[in-house]
Every structure is written in structure tokens, then in C-alpha cells.
Image (tube, coloured by chain):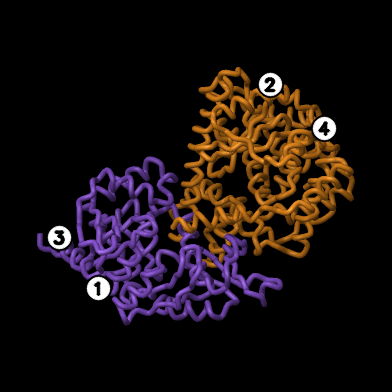
Chain colours: A orange, B purple
Amino acid sequence: MICWPVASMGNEGVLVQCLRDPRAVLSLDPSGWDLLIRQGRRANLLGKLAVLLLDSGLMSLLPASPKAHLLSALKMAERQNAAIHWEVSRISEALRTIGVDIILLKGAAYVLAGLPSSRGRTFSDVDILVRKSEIIDVESALMIHGWQGSHHDEYDQRYYRKWMHEIPPMLHVRRGTTIDVHHGILPETARIQVNTQALLDCPLPVNGFHNIFVLKPADMVLHSAAHLFHEGELDNGLRDLADLDTMLRHFGVEQSFWFGLVPRARELGLLRPLYYALVFSMRIFNTPCPQSVVAELKAICPSWVFRWLMNACYTRALRPNHASTHTGGTWLARKALYIRSHWIKMPVRLLVWHLLHKAIKTPAKENQFNTQNKKLDAQ
Amino acid sequence: MFPFVVRVRSDISELAEDIGRIYQDFTVLDSNCFSDFHVEVSYERGVRRWFRPLARFYFDGRPSFIPLPVDQAFPMLEWGINWCVAAHSHSFLIVHAAVIERQGVAVVMPAPPGSGKSTLCAALIGRGWRLLSDELALYDFETKQLYGMARPVSLKNQSIPIIQAHTPAAEITSPVPDTTKGTVALLRPPSESVQQVKIPARPAWIILPHYQVDADALLEPLSKGKAFMLIAEQSFNYNVHGREGFEAVGDLVDSCECFQFTYSRLSDAERVFDDLLARRING
């Protein structure tokens, strides 16, 4: 492991153990299963675990009740995979007339590229990347085809359009699906400036579409890494790290992938996120990584203070956000990473202004809960 | 609560009493067993604890749904468990329907709220039919059988005094007024239904109940097409199953005689349902 000043702490949880080695399920007693299903459900990783258990031929050996939950999660994920295909076909159709090429990001990209990281995974929306100059055209075309903007509040509009790397999420009026249209992979105001142009230059076409693309392997990994290590709310942190692990194993079969990875990260300005992604993926999931890359990482590793802090925080935050994995400092670690995410997202003056605005504005969050309750009432 | 085990946690003593009474025939498992769902209904903290206290539902430690006045704790627990099952148990086709059984064959009553299915269900389980569920029909894709949980029947508004008059021996919680569904009370499931909870039932009839003031009982055929659409609309996870879901609804509808049933008197309903059963057994 790479020069971490603090040794790995225990209490990573039964879910991580079973993801690392599915055979670990064979020694679980009923209370162990109980915890595994709860952690898996909370981390949105039950479907992924089901895939691993099926692939290793263990599924038929499992006790009936936990097995039902695993298969249930897998079924939901398979359904969402099919729905993503359909949604992307609608997006492709909507953008056909304006002749704009789009790049799918994250979950939708894994599905359309047929990557193993899509298996068993659930989704909340489709993320796409377009050139900044084309964003107005894309937005209008989507509106014509039934997607509506959200966040009508003037402040939110300015927040997205001036400072962020995406426009406010758009919701399809009939299907209720959400699309996030990005023109960059990190906010305009972020401390790290990414070479978005280089990212847009050579995407890979998706079979069956003329205007849908995905990032090439190294870029896909770098984007996921940048996303995970800039994210402030890490409820899906472990899931996103599992995506990275699966991609690194899949792409890493080709030696050329590894040779190009660090140079490409340097070119895009994403060395630091790559460093953290590889270190934590190796550490939590035992991701295989060539010695030459490990040596390159040593050259780009941050100072010991940062390493110590980031280690202390991410070790705790990259666990399922479930009471059973909470140890001393978990709450603080999650808060610290939340603050860090804002800190690196915008300059101090803007941040203070933004937080003040959010604090003063009365939250209208109860509406979400009301919608949930209505669904219950429908019973 | 076969096929599910629920672990409930609460600091509301009245809720514990209600559960103890209404769920008295259910098996209590030891704390090391596997639970399908961990739920909690507890007092909302803060000053509200002392001034018109609220209770909140937690799914495995995470607050879900808006807090409600504490006297709604039991109905909230029931709704919460329904949500847990409907959202996580895709090994079944789950239909919003009451299911009752007699002599191995089951009636499925899918219906939107207000059609009187819970009232009908509560009345018939007081007259020898076995309760599988008053809310969630669990259809197994492989065995093509229905499973139930034999959980309490949720009675609303006028159906509470109606059932009290119809089945005087029935044990019902004190009515809770002013919920989103009006006044609600929960009926203790018959002991025999709980004892037989693990036994599935073969679907034989799909009956769409329709309560109409002063109407004479009328049992009319319902076309298979309409029955199919009804089951699909009332299913919580039809869309999750894709083609398999389509085929399961088809199988379920094919295996049943389908009717629409208009009624106003529970005695008529008992007669009609018993006639259906007699016809099937004899014919």
C-alpha cells in the first residue's frame, strides 16, 4: 500500500468483505446475513452483490430470505438497465434534428457501453456532456420533446448557469425521468480546472446510434474519479468506488490502458482524483494495479498532512452509510468532506455568499416527504 | 408475518400495547434471526415531544415520510410496513388487492381505495374465510399461488361501526380520527388465519367490489381484458418485471373467473361468495 501514515482501521463492514470475496457469504450466520442485506441496501450495492454471487456460482447455496432480497434488487437493476436504453434512444431522437453529438456519463455510459459496472446497478438519472456552445440548442431541443427545466428560483438559475458545470436538471413531463445536461465535469468555479476540450475530442461511438458517444476508457475512469472525490454527499460513495474497481479490472486487462492512465490524468488536470481513486480502490477492493503505476502514484502523492486527513475522512465515508459501520468520527468525517466539497467547488467569497443564501432561504423540503406520503396513501 | 420477518422498535408504549394485542397470534422470533425489514416508529424529538407529540417512521434508521400525530403511530407502522414490502420484494408480483381463501381457493379483490374491499374482506373473514391480506396480494411467479401475511385489516370511516355490528367478537383498535384516509382502526386477524399464514392459496376468482348505497347484490362477469388492466394498474411492481410481469398477470387472470360485484349489504356478499364456492366445489 502506498505510504499511508495510518493503518487500515477495522469495521469496514460485512458488505465490503463480501464484495471483496463473495465466498465470505458462506460463513455468515442469520444475523450476519441480516447485516449484509441492510448494508447492501443502504449502499445501493445489493444488485452488484447479487451479480458477484451469481457469477461465482454461489447464489443457489444461499438461504431463501436473503436470496430473495438479492434477486429482488437485481431484478430492479435489470429493469432500470432496460429503461436507460429506452431513455437514451429518446434523447438521441430528440437531438437528431439539431445535429449535436452528446457524450453519456457515468451510469448511462456504463449501460450503453455494455460495461460490467452496469450490471446490478441502479440509476437515478441520465447524465450527458455537450460542448458549452451547444448547450442552448440542446436545452431547447429537449424542451420541445417534453423535458422541462427545474429550479425556477432566480438564485438557483444563476447558481447553475453561471457557476456550475451543468444546467438545472430537466424532467420529462410524461415519463418522469431526469436528465442532467453538463458542459464540463467540474464546476466552472472549481479550484481544479479540467481540460474539458481534451475530454470532448475523442469519444467512442455507441453502437446503434449516430449521435451518442461515451468517453474512452481512461477518460471514463478519470471522470468517475473526479466525480467521486469532489462529491460532498457520499451516500453512494462506496457504490461509486465499486464502479471504479469494476472498470479498472475490466479495462486493465489491456496493458495499454495502464500505460496511458497517468499521462492522460496529467493532460486533463485530474492527477489528484486519480491518485485517490486508485489508492482507495486498491485498499478497499484489492484492485490489481501494475507496479509501474504504483510507482507513478508515489511521485504524485500529496503531502503527509493531506494524506492523513483524506485517509481519516474517506476511510469512514466510503463505508455504507449505515449505523452498523459508524465509528468514532464518522459523522465528523462526512461533514468535513461535505465542507471540503464546497471548498474546492467555489472561491471563498462565493462560498460564503452561497451558504448565507441557503441558510436564510426557508427550506421547502417537506414537499418531497408529502409526495412520498401520497404514494403511501394511494394504497 | 410469513413470508416476511419484521423487527419493530419504538419508544411509544401505547404502540407496544396495540401491537401486543393485534399481533398476538404471530410468532415472536429471537433477536439473532434474519429480519427482512428493520422499522421504527418513535416520538419525534424536541419540544414537540411535550406539545401535541408527533411520531415518525424510520426504515432501518433512516427517517421516512412526514411525522404524524402520535395517536396515528399504529396505522403509520402498518403503512410503513406495506411500503417496505411493496418497494423491496420483487420476487413476487405485488398487487394492491385483498385476498381471502376457503377450501384452498382464493378470491382476489383488486380495487382502488373507497370501493369497500377492506370492509368486504373484514366481513368475510368473520364468517369462515381465511385472511391472506387486505392490502397486498403476493403472487409467486413460479408456483402461480398467492401468499399473504395475515396482517391486521385496516378499516376506514363508516366501515368501523359496520364491522363492529357485523362481527361483535372482532377485536378492533380504538379509531384514530383525522388521518389522511379519515378515521382508521385496525382489526385483529383471526387466529386461524395467522396459524395458516405459511400456506399459499390458488387464485380462483378476481372480483372487483363496488359498494353502492341501497343496491341489491349484483354479480356481473368482468371481461378478461378489463381484469388484466385492473390487475396491472393495481400492481406496485408490474413495471419492474417487464415481460415476465405481463405473463404473470396473464396467468393470474387466465386462472380466474372474473366478476364485478355491486353490493350494499354484507349478508348478500356472504351469500354470493359462498354460492361461488359451492358451485366450484360441486360443479
For label 1, the SS is: loop
Instruction: Provide the residue designation for mark 2.
Output: A202
Q: Is residue B80 left or right of residue A213?
A: left
Do the residues at discs 4 and 1 belong to one chain?
Answer: no
Instruction: Provide the residue designation for mark 3.
Output: B280
Task: Point out the frontmost of discs 4 and 2.
Answer: 4
Q: Is residue B65 visible?
A: yes
For label 2, the SS is: loop
Task: Point out the frontmost of discs 3 and 2.
Answer: 3
Q: Amino acid at mark 2?
A: Cys
Within-10-Å neighbours for mark 2: few <14, some 14–19, many 20+: few
Task: Point out the frontmost of discs 1 and 2.
Answer: 1
Do the residues at discs 4 and 2 belong to one chain?
Answer: yes
Rendered residue at 10%/63% (across/down): B282
| Tag of residue A332 | none
Q: Earlier in the sequence, mark 4 or mark 2?
A: 4
Q: Amino acid at mark 1?
A: Gly
Marks 1 and 2 sit apart, C-alpha to C-alpha, by 71 Å
Q: Amino acid at mark 3?
A: Arg
Within-10-Å neighbours for mark 3: few <14, some 14–19, many 20+: few
Q: Earlier in the sequence, mark 3 or mark 1?
A: 1
Instruction: Provide the residue designation for mark 1.
Output: B128
Task: Report if the CB atoms under discs 4 and 1 are less than 8 Å apart.
Answer: no
Q: Chain of mark 1?
A: B
| Tag of residue A193 | 4
Above or below for A240 versus B73: above
Above or below for A18 versus B9: above
